[in-house]
Image (cartoon, helix red, strand yellow):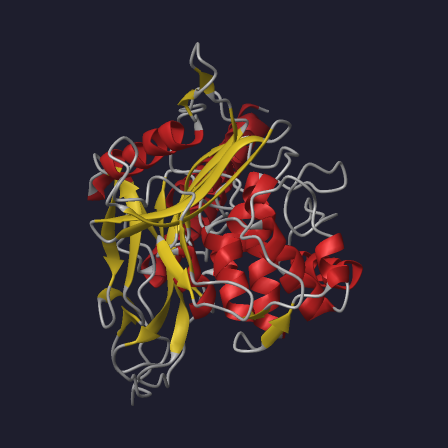
Amino acid sequence: MKKLRIFPLILTIILMISLLNVPVVATEEDPAVTSGCHSVDAAMTLSTEEKITKTAKAAILYELNSGTMLYAHNPDGKIYPTSMVKMMTVLVALENADPDETVTVTRSMRQQIPIGILGIDLKTEEEISLRDLLYCTMVASATDASVVAAIHVGGSIDGFLQMMNDKAVELGCQNTHYGNVHGLHDENTYTTARDICRITEAALQNEEFRTMFGTAKYTVPATNKSEERAIKTTNNMMNEGNSKYYDKRVTGGKTGATDQGGRCLTLTAEKDGMQILCVLMGATPTMAENGSVDAYGSFEESKILIDYAFENFEFRQVFFDGQSLTQYPVSNGASHVVTQATTSISTVLPIDVDETQLKWDYRLSDSNLTAPIEKGQILGAVQVWYGTKCLAQTDMVAMNGVKIAQSPIIPEKPAGMFGGSWWIVLLIILGLGVLAFVGIVGLRMFHIMKHQQRQRRRSRRK
């Protein structure tokens, strides 16, 4: 008998659970990534290739316009920077002195220049501009010019080294230290490909540095101790006269080479709107039988890298200023609000990727938008994702203003089986509850009446 009494109650509960569809605000969980492929510090790259080059100890392909890490091999491994050091020497000098200053080469300065180095043969008491010294440092990789410039700007080698190391810290280089200003091998001078990429990206913001970095030929005017000097870049990929290595896509670069650090090259290359920063460290040269260099390694493998970048990636616009994004209901609002992007953003994508492989992630600052809303009000942000890699982000702002409605409008919620009308669901639940109650009472009355009938029959028999 008790089982029959409980059954209607169980049935009611099951119906309530199956029909109940109360809308809730869901909090979408961020993708399981520490960072995307954007910025020098990116933990990921757009490329899935592990190693493209043959001998390089480390390599990076970085797109400067969008800040996208396309490819990286051993980006954080400790390496010897060779003459990549001179890029920091030039940057620090430009930021801390007037390039038009006249520098007088002293005997003490010349005594601190290593013997047997590549230089421009500076002489004691020679007067030369700081700008000319820095051009010689960058274009011709002249070690004597870097030493004299450093002492002039820093007061001493140690003073200038402190400025270089301070600048490295300022730029966020956690694995770089300078023990000299020229890059000759020194156990206390080390870096990583990622830090070289970081330094180069920052240095290219300096107009003077950018010009020097992209100069293939330069003439140093005559001085009181020397006739004019014609210098040319050590980066053969910028030298039009070098038929083997010249590449018209290359717009700037700095070379370096030591026995311990191998052949190094940092360059920029442009094509189809992309500006590639290529960092290649520690390549191994190939020697001919007569002892001459048959292949430098740095030029050949850098070409492999930039070919890979331009053949496999392209610029695509994902947002444009004023682009309509999506719309949202507004509590107490006279209408919905339409959102739009605030900036135009292009990014780099693999050439074979189409729009269906991208995901737009809309994130409201407040899940319950309430009137009034002003036109242009920031409501959240939208991101576009390629797999687990965030490609771009922009603010979502209100395209239209929303006034308070005379009769409050309740925002539409995700529809259930009754179109999201919660009051209908509630009435059904209440009705079922009443029916269940009536059923239980009716069943109870039925049993009572049956019991009374049996009692009356017993009484008649007696």
Q: How many numbered discs?
A: 0
In the image, taking residue 318 as reference, residue 410 lies left or right, namely right
Q: Position of residue 11 (x, y in %)?
A: 44, 36
In the image, taking residue 338 as reference, residue 26 lies left or right, namely right
Q: Nearer the viewer, residue 431 or 165?
A: 165
Residue 47 quadrant: top left
Which image quarter is the C terminus in? Answer: top right
Q: Nearer the viewer, residue 401 or 344?
A: 344
In the image, taking residue 220 as reference, residue 335 lies left or right, namely left
Residue 399 quadrant: bottom left
Q: Position of residue 356 (x, y in %)?
A: 22, 40
Which image quarter is the N terminus in? Answer: top right
Residue at the spot 39% in from the left edge and 58% down from the top edge? 426
Residue at the spot 24% in from the left edge and 65% down from the top edge? 320
Q: Is residue 182 visible?
A: yes
Q: Is residue 449 visible?
A: no
33 shown above or below 305: below
321 shown above or below 300: below
